[in-house]
Amino acid sequence: MSNSQNFTSSSIIFLLTGVPGLEAFHIWISIPFCFLYATALSGNSLILFVIITQPSLHEPMYYFLSMLSTTDLGLSISTLVTMLGIFWFNTREISFNACLSQMFFIQLFTVMESSVLLAMAFDRFVAISNPLRYASVLTNLKIVVIGVAIITRGTLTLTIMVVLLKRLSYCRSHVLLHSYCFYPDVMKLSCTDTRINSAVGLTALITTAGVDSIFIVLSYVLIIRTVLSIASPEERRKAFSTCVSHIGAVAVFYIPLISLSFVHRFGKGAPPYVYTLIANAYLLIPPVMNPIIYSVKTKQIRKAVLKVFHSSVTKT
């Protein structure tokens, strides 16, 4: 038993998968992925930079946006090396511990993104329903506490999942279905009882993204009720326009997640590359789209970005 456990924890090598059936085109496929990674990394870095350097953006809404950009950066970096390694060099091997580390951070940043979107929904609810108390409700200290709670929640959830994976033995095929380590993929390769792992994984999904989505919807029900009670049509439009960017961020996070779930459940006859491309899009679309959405739809961010570019041009 100890030999099996040693093999499981230190010697096992997993094989990642690129785009099945399209291996000959990996170099060409890498071109759009490189563009998406460059967009995600530069866009989120720019959002963080303008929020840090522009005093006018030192408000609760933009602090939460900086948290969102940080999680998007982490999510992009977590998959960057393995995905491009497969496309460029056909580097498929990944050690067990490295795989668990990658899985931990991918799932951690996903859980954190869901939590940040919930915090941003609460921010919009407070700003619209009780604007006079907005600054006193969301103080800097409370925002720090929310940030620590988001990190703690994700870390505790993922630590339990990783510890449970480490106790398993792996004696089947070591080929994973994606170009990164994904909790269900690793779990399915075990030759021991995984019912506890399945139950913990499902519980984690329900208590994070599931619960968060319910409270986000509830927040918007209350926001809509508040907006409709405003007498002036112009004020109603102005109040609701402050939520457009957040609604877009929620959409680009949950729509790929739902699409991936539907494909896995109902797309049994779909070509293998469809699963892979949708799974990759699920992790890449939010980091790519969030900076674009907030730069286009949020006037203050757009002005700050233009100001930074203007300053750079002036200095050169």
Image (spheres, rainbow, N blue to C red):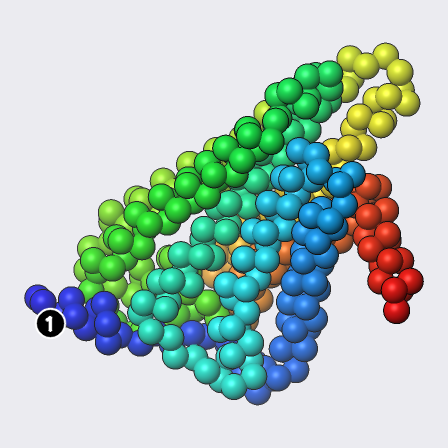
Q: Is residue 229 visible?
A: yes
Left or right of 21 in this view: 287: right
SS for callout 1: helix
Of residues 9 and 219, the one nearer the viewer is: 9
Circle 1: is it few (<14), some (14-19), or many (20+) Cα within 10 Å? Answer: few
For residue 226, what is the image quadrant? top right
* Image spot of residue 313 (x, y percent): 89, 64
Of residues 218 and 40, the one nearer the viewer is: 40
Q: Is residue 214 above or below residue 43?
A: above
For residue 285, what is the image quadrant? bottom right
Please count the marks in the image. 1
Of residues 251 and 151, the one nearer the viewer is: 151
Residue at 19%, 73% (x, y): give it.
7
Of residues 60 and 31, the one nearer the viewer is: 60
Residue at 58%, 66% (x, y): give it.
277
Quadrant including the N terminus:
bottom left
Residue at 82%, 41% (x, y): give it.
300
Q: Which residue is mark 1?
A: 3
Q: Is residue 198 visible?
A: no
Q: Residue furthest left?
A: 1
Residue at 59%, 51% (x, y): give it.
70
* Image spot of residue 62 (x, y percent): 69, 40
For residue 121, what is the image quadrant? top right
* Image spot of residue 268 (x, y percent): 47, 61
* Image spot of residue 161 (x, y percent): 32, 50
Q: Residue furthest front?
A: 315
Quadrant including the C terminus:
bottom right
Give the amino acid type for the residue marked by disc 1 in the picture: Asn
